[in-house]
Amino acid sequence: MLFLFRWWERYRLGLILAILCLGGAWIFSRSQGVGLLEVFRFISGPAQTDAAKQKQLVDAQTVQLRQQMADLKSRNQTLQELLDQDSVQNKQAIAVQILGRSADNWWQQLTLSKGRTDGIDVGSVVFAPGGLVGRVTAVSQGTSRVLLISDPTSRIGVIVSRSRHMGILQGQSSTDAIVTFFDKDPDVKVGDAIVTSSLSRLFPPGLLVGKIKTLKLEQNYNPQATVELAVPISKLEWVTVYLNDQTASLQKTVPANP
């Protein structure tokens, strides 16, 4: 017993280390180093977590700034297109930002950021690059409300630019509208330009409204056609408002269909 005791006292540290090494090697081989990796992650985790969070924050801020710059560039381009129009340059119209519109009447009306103090009045014609948008139906000192041509209650006297056949255009709360022709057999085809008629009481003649998309001529009632509106009304952020005493300048010649 004395021999074993002395042997243990002499070699116990080396024996314990050997057992720990063998056990660690066995665990490493069985777990393929996962346990050691977890220990390393536990030790270095706080530093790595802080660095990763900082990088994610910087990346998110970079993406946000890029999106803001792209949006600002798009807004500036749209506004510049409006300001470059001859009618704006000649003080016949003013460029106005859309102040808002509600979800339940997105296709019916919009509110503008200018009003009577800027020369806008009830009946002012609202335009955008591409064609007709609507007309002002209510005005205060600093804001205006516009009835859109996409509103189902909106009815406009229109004419086929090529053949001069007339009809009534009614909004459908979408990018399309329906025109009902007065004649039973109108000369109309897909692609024809639709403009405001000289018989319209609300708009000057010759304003581009859209183009024929589909035909519904085989009807028991008056023939109809679907018109694709010329202006992307749902995406508008700025519009041009013509002052009432300048509406005569809106009479334009619409080019023939290609």
Image: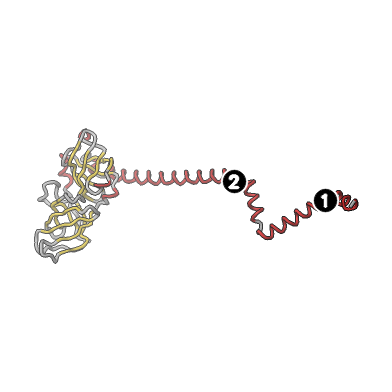
Q: Nearer the viewer, residue 32 or 186?
A: 32
Number of residue marks: 2
Question: Image point 69% across, 57% down: which residue?
Answer: 27
Q: Secondary structure at mark 1?
A: helix
Q: Position of residue 176 (x, y in %)?
A: 22, 56
Disc ID at residue 251? none
Question: Residue at left 25%, top 51%?
Answer: 231
User: Foreground: 11 or 221?
Assistant: 11
Query: Which mark sits nearer the N-terminus, 2 or 1?
Result: 1
Q: Is residue 84 above or below residue 195?
A: above
Q: Residues within 10 Å of mark 2 (few under 14, many from 20)?
A: few
Question: In what element is the residue under mark 2?
Answer: helix
Cα separation between marks 2 and 1: 39 Å
Q: How is the image coloured?
A: secondary structure
| CA neighbours of label 1 inside 10 A, class few (<14), some (14 to 19), many (20+) | few
Residue underneath mark 2: 48
- Image coords of residue 160 (percent x, y): 15, 58
Q: Is residue 72 left or right of 227 when viewed as pictured?
A: right
Q: Which residue is mark 1?
A: 12
Q: 118 or 41: which is nearer to us?
A: 41
Q: Is residue 30 visible?
A: yes
What amino acid does circle 1 point to?
Arg
The residue drawn where x is 34% and y is 46% is 77
Q: Position of residue 159 (x, y in %)?
A: 14, 55
| Image quadrant occupied by the C terminus | bottom left
> As drawn, which residue projects farthest toward the front?
1
Q: Find out whether the residues at labels 2 and 1 contact each other: C-beta distance under 8 Å.
A: no
Position of residue 6 in the picture relative to residue 162 (left or right)? right
Q: Is residue 84 visible?
A: no
Amino acid carrying label 2: it is Gln
Vertical position of residue 116 compared to residue 36: above or below: above
